[in-house]
Amino acid sequence: MTVKEMTAKQLARRVIEQSELFILDVRNEDAFADWKIEGKNIEHLSVPYFGLLDGVEGILDQIPADKETLVVCAKEGSSVMVAEMLSEEGRSVSYLKGGMKAWSEYLEPVRIGDLKDGGAIYQFVRLGKGCLSYLVESDGEALIVDAARMVGPYETFAEEKGLKIKYLADTHLHADHISGGRMLAEKAGGTYCFPPKDAEEVTFQFQPLEEGKGLTVGRTTVSVNPIYSPGHTIGSTTLLVDDQYLLTGDILFVESIGRPDLAGKAEDWVGDLRNTLYATYKELDGKLIVLPAHFSNVSELGEQGQVNAHLSDLFKNNAGLHLDEEEFRKAVTENLPPQPNSYQEIRETNMGKLNPDQEKQQEMEIGPNRCAIHG
């Protein structure tokens, strides 16, 4: 039988459509335990490549013969070799092109909805990393929020739609992924916007993203109003787009809330985080559609792969919004999940202090997002 190639884009459709898939992951056990491809109808078998050098006969009884098998490794090479061995045994098998590195970097654009006076907002879903970024377009202009370091997909999208990228903005100083905002601003001739209270150590110029100083994209009725919302970082800033969409950064997610410890300030910032979630957000219109910068579980994905919810529904269903003050403090300062891989280096890269090469950037970002606390 012929070994087939599956791209990250094809795999993304499988995940979004909840298709059945059996994955043989041949990375080391610790890499698999830390991070894997997840989906509602995905099954896994973890067998390190070095245990298969003499053949795959010993694992055939663990691989269903009636399902397509996808072999996955870190970069592709090992998965091709194992896939060829399975094919020789008569199995229907594919390998993931580019391996987990490609899966980590793939962005799936999803249309979220219309703006009131023309235009639309799109979410770029980074399924392999749990990151979410946004493009707001109106009358030939675009704003991109919390861009990933892979700027090509945004450039291609804007070019296909005939959009001029006017603004790039980060809602906060990211600690789990390297921002592409500054790079894309430079390439596209746009203005990079950043919260000044997160900028004490940055080495670059930016337009302050401050409450009371809105951004206009396209038609004058399409406004982006920053709302100062500290807690995840001291400068975290929520963006209210067109009085319809609430881009919450890493403060509020669909099934969880943000963590305040990635700058070593958990005890200092816990009060800010609680005030943002329980007071600032509580005063906003419950009909607003919350669009976060991350998701943790595939259960948060909608039918098209989008991640969003009405603010009122989150106040009903998100356990992190139903804690008394002591419970809240414990939840966000004790028994926290592991911190993101290389998060200090990522923070310094996003400050402009480090300039790692492409391979190092990939290495720094490998792994899941860990910006959330589940109440």
Image (cartoon, rainbow, N blue to C red):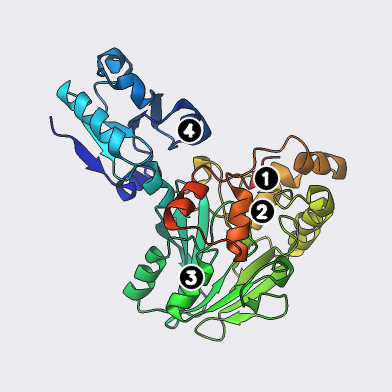
Residue at disc 4, secondary structure: helix
Mark 4 vs 1, N-terminal side: 4
Instruction: Tell whether label 4 touches label 2 (CB within 8 Å).
Output: no
Circle 4 residue: 31
Q: Distance of mark 2 from mark 4, alpha carbons?
A: 28 Å
Residue at the outermost bottom position: 220
Q: Which marked residue is nearer to the observer: mark 1 or mark 2?
A: 2
Mark 3 vs 1, N-terminal side: 3
Q: Nearer the viewer, residue 16 or 228?
A: 228
Check the image and report above or below for 51 versus 198: above
Circle 1 residue: 318
Q: Distance of mark 4 from mark 1, alpha carbons?
A: 30 Å
Where's residue 6, x and y in %? 27, 43
Mark 3: which amino acid? Met
Circle 3 residue: 183
Where's residue 285, x and y in %? 69, 65
Residue at disc 3, secondary structure: helix
